[in-house]
Image: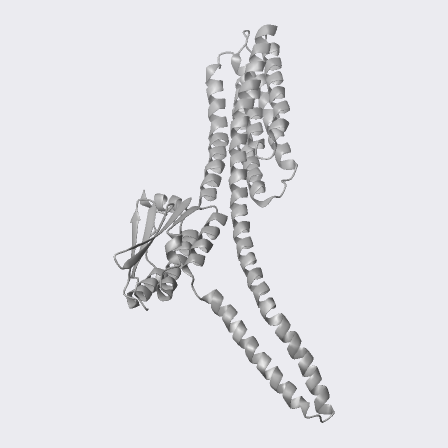
Amino acid sequence: MPTVSRWWSSRSAPQRIDLYTRWSFYSYLGAGLPLLALAVTGSDLEDARVAGVRSFLVGSVVTAVAAVVLASRGLAAHRTGQRIPVRTPGLALGAAAVTGALGVWGFSAGAEPAPATSWAIALPLGMVLTAGSTIWSTRQLAGPSVLVGVLAGAAAAVDGSEAVTAVVVGATIAVTVYAVVLAFRFSVWVLDVVLEMDRTRGVQLQLAVAEERLRFARDLHDVMGRNLSAIAVKSQLAGELVRRARPEAADEVADIHRIAEESLREVREVVRGYRSTDLSSELAGARSVLRAAGVACTVQGVDDAGALPEPVQAALGWVVREAVTNVLRHSRAAECGIVLTRADGEVRLTVTNDGVPGDAAGTGSGLAGLRERLAGAGGTLDAARHGDRFQLTATLPTGSAG
């Protein structure tokens, strides 16, 4: 099924875990409770009350629907951080209690004790507790699980079982219910951890951008603060000299013009410093950004970067920028490797990452622009996919002046 496979591969890791967790709850609660209730019913129908058994089966379906609604709203609350209304778990527990009571009444009509009597009350309540694992903690679920065991043991005793048997049945059901609840509670915990990591990754990227903006603002303030202050003071002085018709006003105006030109030149140098591409800085920045995004990044050959001609560094710097952008935007990479090598009058930059989606083609306007840029400098750009890994290789002659 290529369509389903493509749809699944287009989901991010948090989205996949969210889908898996939700449908695990839906399938277990929506289908599991009616099927188990039907199995319990089929195991002991000889002396059961038909009306009670039918009511139990109908109640199991209603309880299953209520449990699915509870699980759905509970999982949604984990994503949004909002609490669900108290009536949602209250209605589910009420439906389970009524269903269990009908089951006990239906199966306890025989002369001999029936195992179905205990499970009739344990199944609906246990399913609702499983759905409640989306909103209640492990400690909060322990007490209700024990209570289900106590009710199941009491139902067995009412049905005529011996005291020891009733205690064993109750303990067994309590342990079984709590084990199932813990298993689903663990799935919810894993989902919470993944969602929190995804939110943390987004915050780290925002902090990296904010830090870069602050650095630029700090540098611009250091360059322009003193000059603008000088211009303001000299403008005030020049205006006062003009009002007094003093010839020194012309000197002050000329000085203001000189400072303004110096400021313009310094601002251009600051901007040029941010726009120009120093390969060593680009490699260090790539490693920092990828690690902030949760991608393990290794860089080899940094020592050779500073010795390359400036045009070569500029061209390869653009390759690093585009490669890092593609890793962050078009992959679910867990690791990325950047290797810079020099040999036989040429330099080669290779960027390899994993986590490539199934429909990634390795083409785009960014790579096309890089090919044109490198071709003008006498270089080449190759992009190839190997399974779930993507490799970008740029080659340039070290004497290039493009």
In this view of the protein, can residue 381 be seen by the observer? no
List x then y, in percent, for residue 83.
63, 41
Q: In the picture, which quadrant includes the C terminus?
A: bottom left
Q: How many marks?
A: 0
* Depth check, front residue: 190 or 183: 190
* Depth check, front residue: 148 or 353: 353
In this view of the protein, can residue 379 be seen by the observer? yes
Snapshot colouring: one colour
Compared with 141, 112 (above or below) is above
Q: In the picture, which quadrant includes the N terminus?
A: top left
The quarter of the displayed image where residue 159 is located: top right
- Residue in the picture at 52% in, 18% down: 50
* Depth check, front residue: 226 or 214: 226
- Residue in the picture at 27% in, 65% down: 378
Compared with 188, 211 (above or below) is below
Left or right relative to 238: residue 25: left
Compared with 401, 233 (above or below) is below
List x then y, in percent, for residue 341.
32, 53
- Residue in the picture at 74% in, 92% down: 244
- Residue in the picture at 64% in, 79% down: 231
List x then y, in percent, for residue 44.
49, 14
The quarter of the displayed image where residue 266 is located: bottom right
Compared with 144, 322 (above or below) is below
The quarter of the displayed image where residue 119 is located: top right
